[in-house]
Amino acid sequence: MSQLRTSKSDLARDFGISDDRSLSLFLKTLPGVDQVGAEARAVELGTRSIKKESKAWAIDMAISMVDLTTLEGADTEGKVRSLCNKAHRPDPTDPSVPHVGAVCVYNDMVKIARSHLDSIGANEIPVAAVATAFPSGRASREVKLRDTRDAIEAGASEIDMVIDRGAFLSGHYKSVFDEIVAIKKECGEKAHLKVILETGELVTYDNVRRASYLAMIAGADFIKTSTGKVTPAATPPVVLIMLQAVRDFFDRTGIRIGVKPAGGIRTSKDAIKQLVLVNEIAGPEWLSPAYFRIGASALLNDLLMQRFKMRDGYYASSNYVSIE
Amino acid sequence: MSQERIDVKKTYKLFINGAFPRSESGRSYPIFRKASKVLLAQPAQASRKDLRDAVRAAREARSKWQSATSYNRSQILYRIAEMMEGRRSQFVEEIMAQTSATKSVAEKEVSESIDLWVWYAGWCDKIGQISGANNPINGPFYNFTSPEPVGVVGVFAEPDFPLLGLVRAMAPALVGGNTVVVLASEKRPLSAITLSEVIATSDVPAGVINILTGLRSELTPWLASHMEVDGLDISGEKSRSAEIRTLATENLKRIADFNTSISPNRILALMDQKTIWHPIGL
């Protein structure tokens, strides 16, 4: 393993990236993804049988990794508050259920979420904001920077930004790169930066790998699959490729980047499959809410119902979990 | 040179959400011809996870079945009778293979089963009129009572008549607008699977009827305790009555347990009476 570094500031230089040309060259000379191999490996890992005790552990781990999300035009303050309550005590009748990883909302709801979480004693739960003209990312750089600053000032400690897929697909990598650098600078020490690749729009697995490296070198703390507004979203092969990227990046730089699949993960089974991928591809060091999150809303109820089933010994009903 | 033709044997599978899956467990169990030792078939042996999938399908199908007009439900149940008529000889053969019935006895069972669908189909748009009421009250209100389905009903088919025992148990639950998860007769399950092939081609929305074959001892506790099951018809499972009733208490499932085989009361036993108040003059 290469020597460990603590600073991200000179990453681009270490990768030999100084301009548009060198960045393009680096990304385009990354090894191609074996599509059939990646899909087969993801399917194979998805068939792992997880036995009772491990499953109980996995369910609680998955709950603590959920970024409980509401990103609807119809979001109200009341809905965000009830989401915060649920984030803090997913099952109000059972204090042994861990709190979720974060609450993820649109910018204008950040303040409400932060103050409500503080008021119910959930100071440790961060608020994540989707900034930078989410979900399309179609706005000027100034607007995106302002959007980010706005979210941080309102109390967001995690920023979920989208990359400019149009620029990426046109080959303007440097423009995408510079934008991430600029947003990261805006985040500074106050907020974690998650970079959404929107893999459903990137067309090929090779592009997923390239976008992952681009984001990591530009300073992302997390790479996230999708906005949740496009299908396909967090498919197992895509998550596998991103986990390979963070693992290889760690081996080369000593910097551990997190991964956040989002969109389409609705059942406990889906979530546990993701945890198997994390363990097998990236390694057990990533099995922590600090390095792996799952963007979801319906998933939490299914995890709770599985928990009821394990506790009570009979199948649970959705009548006993809250509806968002 | 001619080769002797090899029969194409049928794989008897489960019926869940409008599809015919094998058990997720991969298991099957042997069925013997007329209590002899001659192997008749190897139907799927459902696991508790198949049961869970069936209940999930039934729950999701509730809105489709309940929002259909009672007239439409009636037509669909009648359609099952129509489609069964075309498969008469297959049903007769299977009954004869599974029981000691003669041909004429088996034919009678098939006819009765078909007629019973027609009879229950007719009840769909009448049960509300018979049991609903405009209640007299002291005040400027209308006060209506009307029966509504409880939701998902677990049905235990009667063991002795492979086809009729199944229709008798599941038809009344469907008339009221419930969706069902049926445990077929353990030792004589073949007619249930053939009936599910009829149902799949009778405009019954996927998930409204789900039929499982397997061991009662294995599946019964999971069905009786499942919190998303709202009612049980245990007329076809007298021997486990106490166990089922105990497990059903956690979410207060409605229990139907009849000795009479055919009655509109069997429909009402799996319905709730809902009362609505409405001001007069608005």
Image: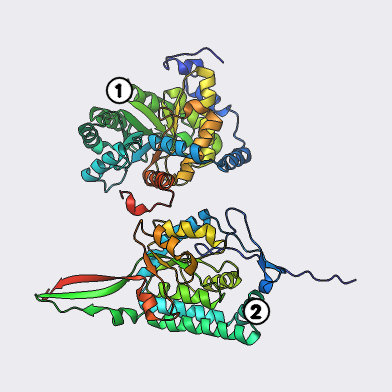
Amino acid on which the number 1 mark rests in the picture = Lys
Residue B106 in sight here: yes
Residue farthest along the right direction in this orientation = B1
Residue farthest along the left direction in this orientation = B139
Give the residue at x 50% y 70%. Answer: B157
Above/below status of A309 relative to B143: above
Subunit ID for the residue under disc 1? A
Q: Are marks 1 and 2 on the same chain?
A: no
Q: Secondary structure at mark 1?
A: loop
Q: Nearer the viewer, mark 1 or mark 2?
A: 2
Subunit ID for the residue under disc 2? B
Q: Position of residue A231 (x, y in %)?
A: 45, 47
Q: Nearer the viewer, residue A136 or A81?
A: A81
Q: Which residue is mark 2?
A: B100
Q: Position of residue B179 (x, y in %)?
A: 42, 67
Q: Which mark is residue A190?
A: 1
Give the quadrant of the N terminus of chain A.
top right
Residue A207 in sight here: no
